[in-house]
Amino acid sequence: MEFINYTPFPHRIFPSDTPADQPMAVIVLRGTFRIVAGAPLRPVPEQAPVALWDVFRGERRASSVLATADAAPFKPRTDIHLIAIAHAPGGKPAAAWPVRIRVGSCKKDLLGRGPHELVYARLFGWTKTKPRPCREVALSYENAFGGSFVIGGEPAAVEENPAGTGWIPRTAPKDEPIRSPQVLALDEPEHVPGRRYLPQGCGPMSPRWAAQWRCNGTLEKPSEEIGYRRTHQPGDEMFYNSAHPDLVYNGHLKRVEEIGFVSLSAQAPVIRTSVRVDVAAADPDAHRVSLVWRGRPPWPERVRRLELRMRELERAGWSKVTYG
């Protein structure tokens, strides 16, 4: 089969299966763009390749995910990923400040706080110190509620976010302070030591975390990351969405370049199918946005030529990008 990519973006094409176990193709494009406030997104000269594996902040599977693999066969909704640092207003140290995220109709309001700890005293039990003013807070799941311990030689963790902090199991060691979460929902009540809360963040979530399983309705956890290989079809395709539940877009983003492909077969007519944006990952400090398009054309037994074309680029895309 001859494959021609007429777009400026890197691509991958790989086989998968439909829910009815019929073979199909999956085409993935990844575009990297520069953020210029108030201006349309424009492609950068050196495009990042399609990602084949998850990228972690630290130790693999023990830390949160920086970027997810692009090899999912389908995403019914667009994932909004934001790898960002919350900066205090005016660059002046503050104990806490609001952080607002808006992508089309998708909204999320967070609260960034300065560092503070949970400390134990025999008379008072666990209490919180006051947040110390700071200039910035990483909006990572390491700074959100969660945590993990080894108790009695056995690992124990908050399944929704084992990379986080602030969880106090009954048998937690009392001789060391525990970092209190610095990233919360803006309308979240004050945390009470010892209680459990849902983690808040805006980056991609590990497919092993319980919050994603509940959001996506899946029943079986994979043993490995999706990776670049033939993937199974779970009962609910929301399995493949990796954003925080509040940042899974209701549908697919539309104000982006529309891309389609044409499959030319000796036995079949021309087949045209839209390729939708199903991942939008932004890094405001790096002034970069990555968009991932994905399509699922039929996979005839005898395909001679497959072309990937862009219908419209000029004046397309987000007309304004703001953050703060």
Image: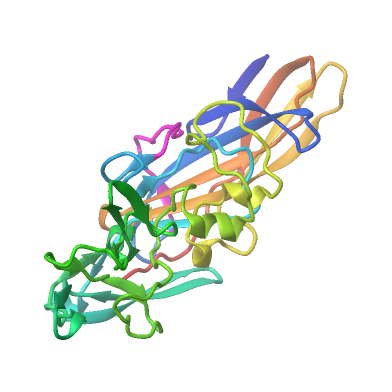
* Side of 235 where 112 appears, left or right: left
Q: Which residue is pictured at 62% across the width and 64% down the height? A: 250
Q: In which quarter of the image is residue 145?
A: bottom left
Quadrant showing the C terminus: bottom left
Taking the magenta stretch, the answer to whether it contains residue 51 is yes
Q: Where is residue 151 in the image (x, y as percent from the top left)?
A: 28, 54
The x, y position of residue 163, in whole percent, is 32, 54
Left or right, residue 227 beside residue 63: right
Secondary structure mostly seen in magenta is: loop
Percent from the top left, x then y, of residue 128?
A: 19, 80
Residue at the spot x=32%, y=80% of the render? 191
**Which quadrant would residue 17 be assigned to in this image?**
top right
Is residue 38 left or right of 272 when viewed as pictured? left
162 magenta-colored? no
Residue furthest toward the front?
152
Left or right of residue 323, residue 3 in this image: right
What residue is shown at x 77% (from left), y 23% (from top)? Answer: 264
Residue at image location 81% in from the left, 29% down from the top? 270
Above/below status of 23 relative to 279: above
Residue segment shown in magenta:
40-54
Which quarter of the image is occupied by the N terminus?
top right
